Amino acid sequence: MMAHPAMEADPPPLIAARAWIGTPYVLSAALRGVGCDCIGLVRGVWSDVTGKPAPPPPPWRADWANASARPLVQAARQYLCPVALDAARPGDVVVLRLQGTREAHCGILECCGQFIHAQEGVGVVCVPFAAYRAGLSFAARFPSP
């Protein structure tokens, strides 16, 4: 997973995601350079890639991590193209389980085992994906422009 041939150009979603790095963490926001949460990052990159307004976020609740529904996955299936976990590559969206619970976090795979996501209290950063890999539960690709 996440092999990146040196001669291949980076996909548009990855280029767009990199432009969000440094955006402050703001719950429920999706404005590059102003603020976003993890869902806002994916919504914003979707808008950057498609040229369309960002889709509405799924109805967020503080207890998502314990909910029986899969709101992140359901939302991703509406706007993205699901891919097998082992087929995920840089530029793809991943949904993660945190601490063994339901899916409550998402971000975008970067090259070389990295991950771009909005971290609460920090903002949009690129970090090693290894710390999150165990929670990987769903992967999807942005639609082609």
Image: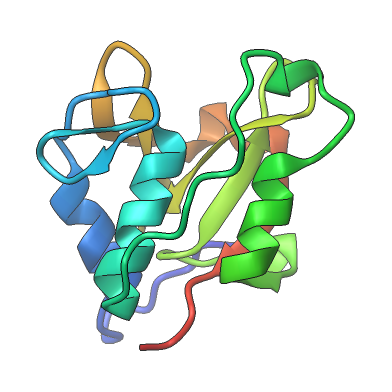
Q: Position of residue 130 (x, y in %)?
A: 53, 34
Q: Quadrant of the C terminus?
A: bottom left
Q: Is residue 11 visible?
A: no
Foreground residue among 68 and 129: 68
Foreground residue among 127 and 83: 83
**Is residue 45 toward the left or the right of residue 18 in the image?**
right
**Is residue 107 toward the left or the right of residue 145 in the image?**
right
What is the total number of numbered labels drawn onto the structure image? 0
- Give the answer, above or below, for where 143 lies relative to 31: below
- Give the answer, above or below, for where 136 lies relative to 12: above
What residue sits 39% from the left and 30% below the top? 28
Question: In the figure, residue 117 lies in which quadrant?
Answer: top left
- Give the answer, above or below, for where 127 lies relative to 17: above
Question: In the figure, residue 44 lies in which quadrant?
Answer: bottom left
- Give the answer, above or below, for where 33 lies relative to 28: below
Foreground residue among 130 and 24: 24
Q: Position of residue 132 (x, y in %)?
A: 57, 31
Q: Of all residues shown, which one is farthest toward the right?
A: 68
What residue sits 37% from the left and 42% below the top? 40
What residue sits 44% from the left and 54% below the top? 109
